[in-house]
Image (cartoon, grey):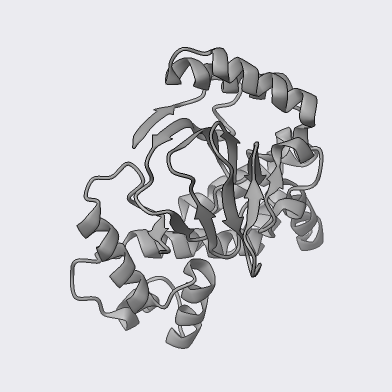
Amino acid sequence: MEYVSRVAGPPLDGLIDDLYYLEGVPPYSRLLLPAAPAPLLIVNLGAPFLIRAGTDIEAVEYTDGCAVSTPTRAWEFGYPTPTRSVGVHFKPWGLAPFLPMSAVKLCDRPATLEQIWGRPAIADVLQRLTLAEAPHEMLLVLEEELVRRLRAVDGMDIVRDMSRAIASTGGSVPISELGMAARASSTYLAKRFKEVVGVTPKRLARSYRFTSTVLAIEVGALIDWGDVAARAGYFDQAHFVHEFREYTGLTPTRYVEVRQRFLREHPYHALEGWPLPAD
């Protein structure tokens, strides 16, 4: 698959990790995406794709693309073959300035682009993307559209600053200390975080803690799961296993098996690193 990434310039650089272009035949027709503190926007340029999010039983078809705020559970993405799209990986607070609704409404519930931007706007964006001659030009078109749609969000500063503090510690910083430093009540912070990020500060910290734990696992080595859980701050291994299943949809041992399969069947693939084969 061809994967092209672009780092956004000001004023989007504080909201976005990167913009990307993806084209080709996916490694698997269905991928399992563990929950991570990373909202996502996809503009689809090919055949419709399928998403089964959260606890949904049935997959939903998306034609124009989708946007989803910080997920709390693993979700399944069904690629068409071939696939072609452009998209954005946001920082936890980064999607909110481009939404007409609260981010919590998109938590584990992806919205279509038509639902958030309207059909005429999406038709215009798709036309401009189609006229672009190369992936980098397409990403510039998408970046320009985001700059045009950028709006102010109440409470953005405090949410951004606290989220950065949470991220810098891998989710281990006490949320109560951050609240006291910000001179804000827990009720106010929870409300603002749900509006901007989609989840509460404590839930975001859990997500960062879990993501840091999973990315540190050496799937090719012998793993002491009790040690992994303890180093991640889980005092009860049963709690660790429960959260592992919630965030990945798999048990720890099954996760390692599936990750090893991806590495074995598609070494150095553009998508290797977080998605897991669901086939």
The front one of 264 and 38 is: 264
Horizontal arrangement in the rendering, residue 65 relative to residue 253 (left or right): right
Image label count:
0
Please give left or right for residue 193 compared with residue 255 in the image.
right
Residue at the (47%, 87%) spot, across then down: 238
Q: Can the viewer see residue 84 in this picture? A: yes
Give the residue at x 43% y 85%. Answer: 237
Question: Where residue 121 sits: x, y (%)?
Answer: 75, 24
Nearest the viewer among 16 and 279 is: 279
User: Which of 154/182 is in front?
Assistant: 154
Residue 120's quadrant in the figure?
top right
Q: Position of residue 104 (x, y in %)?
A: 74, 54
Left or right, residue 210 beside residue 264: right
Q: Classify residue 275 as left or right of residue 66.
A: left
State the image coordinates of residue 209 (x, y, percent, origin top left): 48, 63
Q: Quadrant of the C terminus?
A: bottom left
Give the residue drawn at x 58%, y 23%. Answer: 142
Percent from the top left, x then y, of residue 105?
Answer: 77, 53
Q: Is residue 137 above or below residue 45?
A: above
Residue 36 visible from this viewpoint: no
Find residue 235 and report its image quarter: bottom left
Q: Is residue 259 above or below residue 7?
A: below
- The quarter in which the N terminus is drawn is top left
Question: Looking at the image, which is closer to me, 212 or 107?
Answer: 107
